[in-house]
Image (cartoon, rainbow, N blue to C red):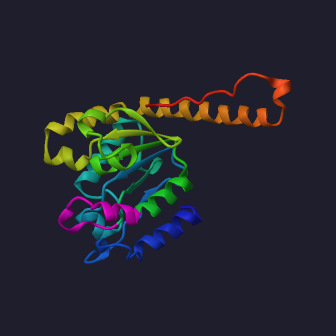
Amino acid sequence: MSQTLTLIAEEVRSCTKCRLHEGTRNGVPGEGNPQAEVMLVGEGPGFHEDAQGRPFVGAAGNLLNEMLGKAGLKREDVFITNIVKHRPPGNRDPMPDEIAACSEYLERQIAEIKPTLIVTLGRHSMGYFIGPSARITQVHGTLKAWRDIAVYACFHPAAALHQPKYREMLEQDFEGLPRALAAARKRAESQANATQEAGSADAVSTDDRGGAAPSQMTLL
């Protein structure tokens, strides 16, 4: 774990920014590869996560590990976190003000890890990156753009456990993850090339070069 991620984790564990810390046992900052290409973002810790201070360690975590295997990935390959870092009472949905209070931690984690692809798990995570008006039944398994990072929307493993009809959709989402990562890599490479060419253009006068600056590829 990098020094920055360690500091964020310490802040999360002592955080009192919103009501969610009340009555919980542990903050759950997240864990995984600090240089991960893939960052998975769920909604919030559950009972087992609150008890252990780790993300996705209950039944939903076991299913997530299985789904990662379908995508040719291991848990140690990725970084896993949540939109909110303390367990909502009774596993209820996180409130907008709670998401806002936690957003600083998530933003700093993303800035430190610099993932090529963010995988959203569940509708609240999807809403943060894709927009609150999006419907997960319509956008799951698709690739979108958030700032300069590709985002791939998936169902939450807990939804697949509680409603079997979503299990097949979740499996399809993760079977498509390798293709999404390949597209995200291509997008990141295109952005890097565009940035490099733009820097070269700045070093040469427009009279010498002429022409327009290269456009960046977007995934929408």
Quadrant housing residue 131: top left
| Residue at the spot 23% in from the left edge and 34% down from the top edge | 169
- Note whether 155 is above or below 112 in the view shown: above
Q: Quadrant of the C terminus?
A: top left
Residue stretch in magenta: 86-102
74 vs 162, nearest the viewer:
162
Based on the picture, tell me whether residue 190 belongs to the magenta stretch: no
Q: Residue furthest top?
A: 211
Determine whether, in the image, residue 52 is placed left or right of residue 73: left
**Residue 150 appears at what percent x and percent y?**
47, 38
- Note whether 97 is above or below 141 in the view shown: below
- Note whether 113 is above or below 1 in the view shown: above
**Residue 154 appears at what percent x and percent y?**
31, 40
| Residue at the spot 61% in from the left edge and 28% down from the top edge | 215
| Residue at the spot 52% in from the left edge and 63% down from the top edge | 5
Based on the picture, tell me whether residue 93 belongs to the magenta stretch: yes
The mark total stands at 0
**Residue 123 appears at what percent x and percent y?**
27, 47
Determine whether, in the image, residue 98 is placed left or right of residue 163: right
Quadrant housing residue 137: top left
97 vs 39, nearest the viewer:
97
Determine whether, in the image, residue 90 is placed left or right of residue 203: left
121 vs 218, nearest the viewer:
218
- Note whether 46 is above or below 165 in the view shown: below
